[in-house]
Amino acid sequence: MIKTTCAAAALALALLMCGGTATAAGCDNACLSGFADRYMDALAARDPSRLPLAPGARYTENTRSMKFGDGLWATATGLGPYRHHFNDAKTGQAGLFASIVENGSPALFTLRLKVVAGRITEAEVLVVRQQTMGAFLKTDATSVKPIWDEPLSPSERMPRTEMIAAVDHYFDGLNQGNGDIVPFDDECVRTENGVQTANNPKGSSGAAMFPDHPELKLGEMTCREQFNTGLVKYIQEVDPRRYLIVDEARGLVFGIFMFRHPGTITSVDVPGVGKVPMMKAALYPFDVEVAELFKLKNRKIREIEAEMVSLPYRSRTGWDGGAH
Amino acid sequence: MAGRMLALAAACAATLGASAGAAHPAPAPSDPAMAMVNAGQCDRGCLVGLMDQVLAAMAAHAPERLPLRQGVRYTENGQTLRPGDGLWGTAEGVGERHFYIADPRSGGVAFIGMIRESGREVESFIRLKVEGRRISQIEALVSRPTGMGAPAAQAGPGFVVRPIFTEPLAPADRRPRDELVAVANSYFAGLEQATDKVTPFESDCGRTENGMLTSNDPGAPRGSMQSLSCGAQFRTGFSRFITEVRGRRFPLVDEDRGLVLALVSFDHAGRLKTVKLADGSTMKVPPPFDAPFSFLMAELFKIRAGRIARVEAVIYTTPYAMPSGW
């Protein structure tokens, strides 16, 4: 079955990649990482013809549909040292967080590939540039934290649907400003655009966001404590929530999520602090599309890595007709 | 230095263009999109009154107060929203600095100026289409910062209402509607071709974008791009890094005042690192124009005796190749 699938691939390299351990979907974890690596090589060469693209393959960059060869394909000037793979052999999808260089400027990069019968049918990309994210971008990571690749013990593993349900509570918790409904590990660490934004002893003081309340040291708080301040409620909707990649063996859930900020929450009653005016940057309508990877350990959210781009309010994802 | 760069970048942005002009002819007067659906039903005062109603309803967060047609469309910064969402939830009123453009013949009216939102003023553009005294289209551009640490759109002296956009022309300086649209379209053609030869400018034409003078700025260093008049900027040929002026619409014309309102998107593919100027020198393409992104723009032209006298633009920065919603 798998040999037949691979043989259907026209390109020799695709054949080689399919030569790994086969699965029902035709491409195992290593095979999918190979597709993502090959994508990066083609991107660095600015040459999409090096990819085994299926007829009608779709490409989006920061939600916009464009042809392979346009956008970052024409401006990438190099690859950075950071490359974090995560895959879903059951659905034939490869995920990647990476650092890149665009016209000499460092940037972060998210890739989702859908692979069918040895060919790429979908490529969804976020490019996180300094011009749109300003100081909220750190590109100096060189190695992937080991925790991401650690397999779970069999007793820790959860069915795919339960993993997604656990992560879904995270977004409900954001909307409601309630960390107690989210299965957080107390050691939960979140890294966003390369910046550690939870459980970070060197985290932000909060003074920049909440000038009258420097005691709100959000970056130092745990994930649960942050949610329980209620200040995250400015993320009033997370819709759509597109769950795209699940790895039961490693406890990974990845999706691309649209954070909607109508800008209408002007203050929050923070327990133990009182009424706190909302940070100014959240007082007008805007969206952020977030590519977010969760590690579940002992059925709790232990590690989060995300890359995100800000977008016009009520943007569409580019995949509203179906992600995969 | 950073401010200077920003001004230069904006000046560059204002200029634009670099593809085949023939691909973007001005709409013919018979174009269905220009259909004159409003004859005699809502005059200038009626149109401006409806715009004021919309602005008041936004500040009151109450779209239900408005005479909206069934199926009314509302877009904000290129996205389709329901009336009541977006600016309707955050607007607090209208700032003192604003003016209107009205076109009773097509049933169009536009507002350019400051809207108070969440305790600050932000330069905005709003366009209505009115059919049978009811509103069928609302299109808003709100030049907010794009969020999450990105630099604010506003810089420089800020938006001011320029009398030239509200003063009527002397009868001899007026031109027919189709000619006015053709002149406005020639601005984009000139940018596409990186030449001043196809666009009729007055010699001291200036341009303002998001409140920033980006052409004919008397305060700019002598010889700098933003010190040059519109035509002199075009003559340098520096606009080639704007790869397409896409989705051009010309929904409002005021023949008495010589106004044409255009809505366009500028695509910057980010491919060019340098541009060879007409004088043989080489200009480095400044950031952010060295990476892919687009502008969604409302651009108002004052055309006097067939020549562009002044340009005023409201700009919102978008992801590369984002459509306008129309």
Image: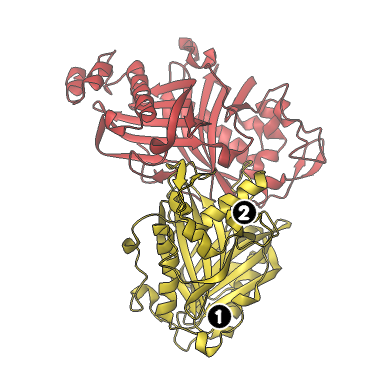
Chain colours: A red, B yellow
Q: Please, what secondary structure does the residue beneath circle 2 have?
A: loop
Q: Nearer the viewer, residue A161 or B293?
A: B293
Label 2 or label 1, whichever comes before in sequence order? 1
Residue B44 percent across, percent down from the top left: 56, 84
Residue B106 percent across, percent down from the top left: 45, 79
Residue A240 percent across, percent down from the top left: 48, 43
Q: Please, what secondary structure does the residue beneath circle 1 have?
A: helix
The residue to which callout 1 is attached is: B47
Q: Nearer the viewer, residue B135 or A144?
A: A144
Do circles 2 and 1 both sit on a common chain? yes
Name the chain letter of the residue that bears numbered label 2: B
Q: Residues within 10 Å of mark 1 (few under 14, many from 20)?
A: many
**Which residue type does callout 1 highlight?**
Leu
Q: Quadrant of the N terminus of chain A?
A: top left
Q: Quadrant of the C terminus of chain A?
A: top left
The residue to which callout 2 is attached is: B144
Q: Nearer the viewer, mark 2 or mark 1?
A: 2
Q: Is residue B266 left or right of residue A25?
A: right
**Residue B142 higher or lower than A206, as above or below:** below
Marks 2/1: CA–CA distance: 26 Å
Q: Nearer the viewer, residue B202 or A197?
A: B202
Q: Which residue is depicted at the point 58% across and 77% down?
A: B50
Name the chain letter of the residue that bears numbered label 1: B
**Residue B259 - label:** none
Q: Nearer the viewer, residue B230 or A136?
A: B230
Residue at the top extreme of this rendering: A153
**Residue B128 in view (yes/no):** yes
Residue A224 percent across, percent down from the top left: 67, 28
**Residue B199 higher or lower than A173, as above or below:** below
**Residue B324 higher or lower than A145, as above or below:** below
Q: Which residue is depicted at the point 50% across and 31% down?
A: A104
